[in-house]
Image: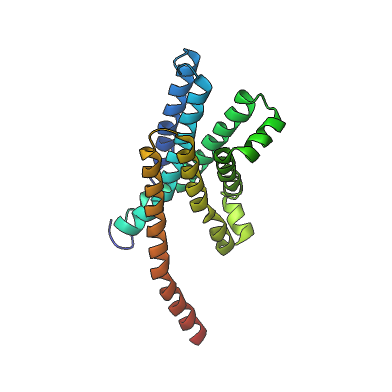
Amino acid sequence: MTPGSRPRPLTWLVPAVLTGAAAPFVVLAWKAATGRLGANPIATALNQLGLLALVFLVACLACTPLKVLFGVTWPIRIRKTLGLLAFYTATSHFLLYAVVDQGLRLGTVVEDVVKRPFIAVGFAAWLLLVPLAATSTKNAVIRLGFKRWKRLHRLVYAVAVLAAIHFRMRVKADAREPFVWLGIVAALLCVRLIDGGRDAPRARRRRSAAAES
């Protein structure tokens, strides 16, 4: 790409991501319809949806660090799509638990949230995702103002940490995979913190120059 040239539209990118993201749901639905989810199909479906939500969430978080570290800009174009996929998958995970597993008995759900820490952590992660999904539109950015919107959407890192902890607490035997996810989230957060630390002096210099002009 020559300096000053505009990036290509890549109109196929989001449809390609959505098509690829649909594949795990199709496979899960097929397994459920054909009785191939094992002895405890609800638990299997819950585990797969929960892990898939974490995958989408971490993929969303990786978009900016890829730009910072390698100058790759195209992932920024699918960041919102990945974030919304994480929200919709996490919502499916929660609804499967609340409606199918618990029969929409709200008292039982509330009791589980209060008494079982791993459910409380997962529920907290989902709750924090709700305002992020609700403010994912351009109108929301205009309404909140970019600075407030940006501060709000930093909650995504708290969501990722809570989701990885929820995964770790859910796994009773081999904890290596949850720790890998925790490590990935920590690494992505470190990249953002270091990049933010480098940007802060530049921002101060720009504000100082603007005040002097």
- Provide residue 105's location: percent of width, then percent of height: 70, 27
Q: Is residue 213 visible?
A: no
Position of 68 relative to 91 (above/below): below
Q: Nearer the viewer, residue 54 or 10?
A: 54
Q: Nearer the viewer, residue 90 or 208?
A: 90
The N terminus: image quadrant: bottom left
Quarter where residue 117 is shown = top right
Position of 47 relative to 158 (above/below): above
Name which residue lies at 38% across and 34% down: 174
Name which residue lies at 42% across and 39% down: 55
Name which residue lies at 59% across and 37% down: 116
Q: Nearer the viewer, residue 208 or 44?
A: 44
Q: Name the residue at the bottom extreme.
A: 212
- Provide residue 201's location: percent of width, then percent of height: 42, 75
Give the side of residue 64 with respect to residue 107, left or right: left
Q: Is residue 139 visible?
A: yes
Q: Nearer the viewer, residue 56 or 10?
A: 56
- Provide residue 178's location: percent of width, then percent of height: 41, 40
